[in-house]
DNA sequence: CATGAATGAGACTTCATTCAT
DNA sequence: TATGAATGAAGTCTCATTCAT
């Protein structure tokens, strides 16, 4: 009776049976196993944090025995690292290529980038990774560094490029690039964190944030501010 | 909109509590044991997360024996809750009274609130609590609820009041109140999280964020946006 | 129901009881515990070897819980080392002082040394240590070195001194000192090993060796050889 | 005392066995798998002891998969037994036939036997078996008994026969046969043990014993003793 | 026959918690 | 009150063994 993980792809639900119809216990699936395990581990790590996650539970969610985890990953640490790497790398690539070739106003580009980021990263399993990293950065400095180098770095760089483009084209005012970029990221990362902690997945949710509306509002403010500018004198 | 609207809703209890949640009637400054323990526990919980924190280490930092912890707090869970409650309540009170009586433009008030929040909450150890809550919200729904009710609720309420005041006074445009407030909070909460995880305390830090500049930049954007408005047509 | 170890001193049989006569589970005996644990561990290690020994069994023989072992010894390795050190050091001192001041013929001195060694070391628990060392030398090079330095070294030195004395006094012929000393030790060490493995403690014993007679025979041969020397011409 | 008395007692089977103990009728040199496994296992068992040896490592050294071990040997225990049996039987046969037909003085015969034993058994991998047996005798009483019956027994018998021959021929004095024989064996067995544990194979070696010299010295002492005999009184 | 894959049983070790003092 | 000592429960990890191919 494998408790079905919310995060497992449907393939894992097809349990093999022997010709007599009895479920087969020892299935051989060298190829698929590691991915299934990583998927299960992601769910549990995001849910419980590193220290709180139990190999037992990961195994159960992956539908394998606890010992099998150690066949593929030498230790809990290694499994954790694999979870981060696996999920990050894939998503990031997809995101970057989406944004790369955009033609249009800088405002639209910023809006596109933010919405896309949410669609392709923040709202996916990978969004949970952000929470994980922030939780465990101190315990896994190596991973924190990895996240900096491979995720935040490129992300910030990309967004900075967008802003620079806007300034160069006379669409944006002269900006404190670093802080502005961090500010943009902060909205998005916060959204991940908040959802993981208080949001959809948690009954104790606070004021339900509707991500798309929240992001759009952030974009509006970012681009236009909230103060009424005294254009009136224009009459 | 009178100053009155800036006041906290009645839910937030002002009376001081001892770390166990019992109201505490002017206890002598003596018998500071529980407070010392809570202080030590805060540091360790923030550093390691709930599951990763060990009672041994808390005891050592508090300068007492491990068994003594159990004299004051029936369990690790209870100690954790006490940590959250104690730190939140105290800080929040100070912050609220600071902001409550402000007279001046709404832009300045927003700026004041944000900077003050950082000074009096975010940058203090209480800032670590935010990280804790987000980490452990799922494992301690009770605490998450408490945080919602006692912390986020009043905070959002306060900020909403500020915005409403601005709109009423014709200083701010008509806003999506909820999302705008969440956006403001997100910058600040994110700053806490980031600092705890990647920031000052961690050698693996990324692009060092300078909090005050970051906040000021957020304020500037919030109030004015980043786009160059084509007032030109005004001729 | 603590299975009584053959090697535990009688003191450990006195289990404490509360005033109502019920056996007391949690006894506090800071002073005695480590010794009791080491004693139990010695028995189990000698019996099973390092890898084969189970902390569970050591704990049971020591009459404590498994966790208690780790209160006193950080790891199985450390416990093992403590066992070796504790047992060796004590015995060795006793032995050396016994032999040191002997006055008499060298033959008698050799005989005394061998018999004493058996009495005070070989036949005691410490004799089991020799087996342990030889078993685990490769896995614990550190301990093997310790044994060489602290046990074999002094032992060989002592015996060499005895032989030199005999040669100097014209009682012994000119000898291959090193090999002769090793030969003497070999009898004694072998006796330990044999007893531990095949001897008294093991039902599958082979030809029961009677230690004292065996040693005496070794002494006789050592001193006189077994060949008939052609003294006959003496008529 | 004819040569006949030097012959082995009937218990020692001369026919070759396969590692599983089944008599093996001129199997083709092909299918050497089991032998390779046993050879690898011998090395690992001697190195690590029974409990410390891992099937994984044996498999790797044998160049087969772990599962293959279980094709030939039902369990680790069985493999261990096969290792002992195989190695002992083979070597012993060679040794016995070497010594059996000797003609000459008893002193020379003793010397020959001891040197040959070292050459053909002690110094070979079979020497490691002795260590193994002594290590694991308690855990494998069956094997200990086997060793007694098949190895020590014949060995002692052979040596006793040699000594009896010497006494009968007036070359040796009347001896405590059992203890003298054990004494001789002890030198040789000790040499095995010492080498395995502290000797050549181990960097932590103590005073490097040179086996041939050691044995020769033992022979010299055995035959002549070390005391200067006071033939003087012969006057 | 051989093996890659999987696992049950059990090892060492940790840690929140208890208890007698 | 405070604590040194002790431990049950549970965690990570290992390894001989099994099974389908």
Image (cartoon, coloured by chain):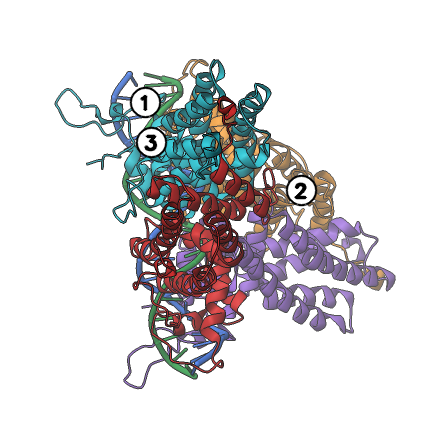
Chain colours: A cyan, B red, C purple, D orange, E green, F blue
| Cα–Cα gap, marks 2 and 1 | 48 Å
Cα gap from disc 2 to disc 3, whole angstroms: 75 Å
Dot 3 corresponds to which residue? A212
Pick the front one: C218 or A28: A28
Q: Is residue C162 left or right of residue A124?
A: right
Question: Residue A2: which quarter of the image?
Answer: top left
* Secondary element type, mark 2: loop
Question: Which picture quadrant has residue D118?
Answer: top right
Q: Which residue is farthest front?
A: A235
Asked if residue C162 can be seen in this view, the reply is yes
Q: Chain of mark 2?
A: D
Between D190 and D156, the one lying in front of the other is D190
Q: Residue at x 35, y 45 (%)?
A: A197
Question: What residue is pinned by disc 2?
Answer: D199
- Identified at 51% across, 65% down, the residue is C72
Q: Which residue is mark 1?
A: A29
* CB-based contact (under 8 Å), mark 2 and mark 3: no
Residue B202, placed above or below residue F8 = above
- Name the disc covering residue B24, or none: none
Seen in the picture, residue A13 relative to D197 is either above or below; the reply is above
Crowd tier of the residue under label 2, counting other residues whose Cα lies within 10 Å: few below 14, some 14–19, many 20 or above: some
Rate crowding at label 3 as few (under 14), some (14 to 19) or many (20 or more) other CA atoms within 10 Å.
few
Where residue A87 appears, as percent x and y from the top left, is 42, 28
| Horizontal relation, residue D109 to residue B111: left or right | right
CA gap between label 3 and label 1 equals 39 Å
């Amino acid at each position: 009776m494998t408790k079905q993980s919310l995060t497992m792809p449907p393939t894992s639900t097809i349990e093999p049976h022997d010709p007599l119809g009895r479920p087969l216990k020892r299935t051989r699936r060298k190829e698929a196993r590691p991915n299934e395990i990583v998927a299960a581990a992601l769910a549990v790590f995001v849910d419980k944090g590193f220290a709180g996650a139990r190999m037992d539970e990961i195994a159960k969610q992956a539908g394998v025995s606890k010992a099998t985890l150690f066949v593929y990953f030498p230790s809990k640490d290694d499994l954790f690292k694999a979870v981060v790497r696996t999920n990050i790398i894939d998503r990031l690539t997809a995101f970057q290529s989406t944004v790369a070739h955009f033609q249009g106003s800088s405002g639209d580009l910023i809006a596109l980038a933010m919405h896309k980021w949410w669609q392709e990263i923040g709202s996916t399993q990978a969004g949970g990774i952000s929470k994980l990293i922030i939780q465990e950065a101190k315990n896994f400095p190596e991973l924190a560094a990895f996240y900096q180098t491979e995720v935040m770095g490129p992300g910030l760089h990309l967004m900075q490029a967008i802003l620079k483009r806007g300034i160069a084209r006379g669409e944006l005012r002269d900006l404190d690039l670093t802080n502005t970029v961090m500010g943009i990221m902060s909205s998005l990362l916060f959204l991940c964190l908040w959802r993981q902690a208080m949001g959809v997945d948690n009954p104790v949710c606070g004021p339900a944030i509707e991500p798309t509306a929240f992001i759009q509002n952030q974009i509006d403010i970012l681009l236009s501010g909230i103060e009424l500018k005294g254009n009136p004198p224009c009459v």
